[in-house]
Image: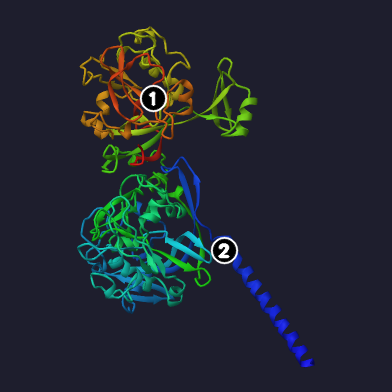
């Protein structure tokens, strides 16, 4: 009995001990799951093209060649395409590597793992290709350090996490052999998983030299789960993408990037037709040396394109994401050899020895973010270029346009309401206004009063302009939004641009400049004086404004003028070569998205008509005479040109001003780029 009692007591003690140990282990493990292991966080952000911003938690797991060791200044890759830490200039270490003992092109020095590669090891190394690694003649080996791989957490399921690489880690074709292929038999699947030759149609054995074997130790591979990889047909073209597979490492599919709810959970914008910052990736320097292309397009400098595992319009093609973050469902040929590889995998959090690696936000890779933007000169002269116009068969107008944006001038735009900012609204209610103007914490506001109505408050904000054309140190700018509402002519009569009241109001001209003898030269009575300081006005060049006849009706549009502020003409919006330079369609019967504009809150207050619904575009007037001299050509909310025109006294059409800016001035700022993608209707 006594022995039984002691044994029972000991069992109870052991049970309590193990229970406490288990609880302690769980307590230690808990911060791992709560503090820095998180699913993607998505919030609204109208500054981004998709209207949302994503933040991913990041971890390190495994290692892969990334940093190149060089003996002197590095010139093989354009500076703008590099990130901090991509290259290490260390002539002493370089000499050690050159004289080291290598086993299968790998070695260790002072405990650090290195890989060497020759030009023959590159996937492609064609000479003198723009946006590709520049191989220096006479240099046999390039040396790379194995660095921890940084991953973004894109999904959690119990004690498991789905990881997506933070950068494009290597360069591989989707398939090394011509002909139809799906993910199941592709060489990229075999390479990612270090499969033997019978797993791919090209018959290449990747055991020992595939991504899985290079990037992870045996213990780490045990922590990587075999996952069912679904391969649904291409949703646009119906292309069969083969059978589902079970893999440790995989590429993302169309469903996981844009065409299903899975995409949103992963932090992407769940639709095609948008340049999504969350889908833009840069390649490592090792990936570039292997052959990955990088972009020189302003605003997207250094970004690369990457494959998904979904076939394109045929089984010989594969879908991809370009440097803009735009989806090409039609795809490119599967043997394309300069795309980046973006691996993804599932890990067991209890087995994987992961480390926290901060967070990354799609706001950090927003439109316009580039090395040039971070220069000390906020004007970024080198980045101010003509619009980039590219074909886009999926778009209604057959193209996609990227405009450089400039901040210049200042004008009432956003309304402050109790809903938008209650505290600021109450401060403005209590403020002491001088001529309906007020300044608070460096911000300027305008008060607008109407009979029988409460006061309304508008923030004066920098005006945003699209660069339409750069020439001889000047830039032709067009307002990025509909900022005003004024009739072309204050009274109904035959009139043209050279003698209309709108021209006088835009430029601050006196009574002798318009047919109605309206004096617009007073303080606060014209756009030029309200929107620009005296110094800014000096940077706006007086420009010869040609007023060609109406293309369809042959109506004269008045004499040539010389103005600082003007409206676009019919000929500048379609027909002429200049219209294409400016990013517009040469046709007037096309719903041209580059001719679609949205109004500011202030423009709506002034009377601008805005279409109902999500799009909310305006219609706006040009400076060209319509079918009679009391009509003026306009562009409707869909971007169609209406050459017949509308009455010159129309009071709810928007004003989209234009000007020519002296780029040598210092009164403007570069504001990134804006892409009109296929998502706009």
Residue shown at 45% from the left, 51% from the top = 264
In the picture of the structure, the residue carrying the numbered disc 2 is 33
Q: Quadrant of the C terminus?
A: top left
Q: Nearer the viewer, residue 278 or 643?
A: 643
In the picture of the structure, the residue carrying the numbered disc 1 is 538
Is residue 65 in sight in this rendering? no
Between the residue at mark 2 and the residue at mark 1, the CA separation in whole angstroms equals 59 Å
Q: Residues within 10 Å of mark 2 (few under 14, many from 20)?
A: few
Q: Quadrant of the N terminus?
A: bottom right
Location of residue 233 (image quadrant): bottom left
Q: Nearer the viewer, residue 240 or 382?
A: 240
Q: Nearer the viewer, residue 546 or 676?
A: 676
In terms of secondary structure, where does tag 2 sit? helix
Q: Residues within 10 Å of mark 1 (few under 14, many from 20)?
A: some
Residue shown at 31% from the left, 70% from the top = 190
Q: Nearer the viewer, residue 72 or 296?
A: 296
Residue 56 image offset from top left, x and y in percent? 48, 55
Which of discs 2 and 1 lies nearer the camera? The answer is 2
Residue 128 image offset from top left, x and y in percent? 21, 56
Residue 419 image offset from top left, x and y in percent? 58, 33
**Side of 324 where 444 appears, left or right:** right
Is residue 594 in sight in this rendering? yes
- Mark number, residue 152: none
Question: Nearer the N terminus, badge 2 or badge 1?
Answer: 2
In the picture shown, does residue 131 fall above or below 573?
A: below
Location of residue 133 (image quadrant): bottom left
Residue shown at 52% from the left, 68% from the top = 349
């Amino acid at each position: 009995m006594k022995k039984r009692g002691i044994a029972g007591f000991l069992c109870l003690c052991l049970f309590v001990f193990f229970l406490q140990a288990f609880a302690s282990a769980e307590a230690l493990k808990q911060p791992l799951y709560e503090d820095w292991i998180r699913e993607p966080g998505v919030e609204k952000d109208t500054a981004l093209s998709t209207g949302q911003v994503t933040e991913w938690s990041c971890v390190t797991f495994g290692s892969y060649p990334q940093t190149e060791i060089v003996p002197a200044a590095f010139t093989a890759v354009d500076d703008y395409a590099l990130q901090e830490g991509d290259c290490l200039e260390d002539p002493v270490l370089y000499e050690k590597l050159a004289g080291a003992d290598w086993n299968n092109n790998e070695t260790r020095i002072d405990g650090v793992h290195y890989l060497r590669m020759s030009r023959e090891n590159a996937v492609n190394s064609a000479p003198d290709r723009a946006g590709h690694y520049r191989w220096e003649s006479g240099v046999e080996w390039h040396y790379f350090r194995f660095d921890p791989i940084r991953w973004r957490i894109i999904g959690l399921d119990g004690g498991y996490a789905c990881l997506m690489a933070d950068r494009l880690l290597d360069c591989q074709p989707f398939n090394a052999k011509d002909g139809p292929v799906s993910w199941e038999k592709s060489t990229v699947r075999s390479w990612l998983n270090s499969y033997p030759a019978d797993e791919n149609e090209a018959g290449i054995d990747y055991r020992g030299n595939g991504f899985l074997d290079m990037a992870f130790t045996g213990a780490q591979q045990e922590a990587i789960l075999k996952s069912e990889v679904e391969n649904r047909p291409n949703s646009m073209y119906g292309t069969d993408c083969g059978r589902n597979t079970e893999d440790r490492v995989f590429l993302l599919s169309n469903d996981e990037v844009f065409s299903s709810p899975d995409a949103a959970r992963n932090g992407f914008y769940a639709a095609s037709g948008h340049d999504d910052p969350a889908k833009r990736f840069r390649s490592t320097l090792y990936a570039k040396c292997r052959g990955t292309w990088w972009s020189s397009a302003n605003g997207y400098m250094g970004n690369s394109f990457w494959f998904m595992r979904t076939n394109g319009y045929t089984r010989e093609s594969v879908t991809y994401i370009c440097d803009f973050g735009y989806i090409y469902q039609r795809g490119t040929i599967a043997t394309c050899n300069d795309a980046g590889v973006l691996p993804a995998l599932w890990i067991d959090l209890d087995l994987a020895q992961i480390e926290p690696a901060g967070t990354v936000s799609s706001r950090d890779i927003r439109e316009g973010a580039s090395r040039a933007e971070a220069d000390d000169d906020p004007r970024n002269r080198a980045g101010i270029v003509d619009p980039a116009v590219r074909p886009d068969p999926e778009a209604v107008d057959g193209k996609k346009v990227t405009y450089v944006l400039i901040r210049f001038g200042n004008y009432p735009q956003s309304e402050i309401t109790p809903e938008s900012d209650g505290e600021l609204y109450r401060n403005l209610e209590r403020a002491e206004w001088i001529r309906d103007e007020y300044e608070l914490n460096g911000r300027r506001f305008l008060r607008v009063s109407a009979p029988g109505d409460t006061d309304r408050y508008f923030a004066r904000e920098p005006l945003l302009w699209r660069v339409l054309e750069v020439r001889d140190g000047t830039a032709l700018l067009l307002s990025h939004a509909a900022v005003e509402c004024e009739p072309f002519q204050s009274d109904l009569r035959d009139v043209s641009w050279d003698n209309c009241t709108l021209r006088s109001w835009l430029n601050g001209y006196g009574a002798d400049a318009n047919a109605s003898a309206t004096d617009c030269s007073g303080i606060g009575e014209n756009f030029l004086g309200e929107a620009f300081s005296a110094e800014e006005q000096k940077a706006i060049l007086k420009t010869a404004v040609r007023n060609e006849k109406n293309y369809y009706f042959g109506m004269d549009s008045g004499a040539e003028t010389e103005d600082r502020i003007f409206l676009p003409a019919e000929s500048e919006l379609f027909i002429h070569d200049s219209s294409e330079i400016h990013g517009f369609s040469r046709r007037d019967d096309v719903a041209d998205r580059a001719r679609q504009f949205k109004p500011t809150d202030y423009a709506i207050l002034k009377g601008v008509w805005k279409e109902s619904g999500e799009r909310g575009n305006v219609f706006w007037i040009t400076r060209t005479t319509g079918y009679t001299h009391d009509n003026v050509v306009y562009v409707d909310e869909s971007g169609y040109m209406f050459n017949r025109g509308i009455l010159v006294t129309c009071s709810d059409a928007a004003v989209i001003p234009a000007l020519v800016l002296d780029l040598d001035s210092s009164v403007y700022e570069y504001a990134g780029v804006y892409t009109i993608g296929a998502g706009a209707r």
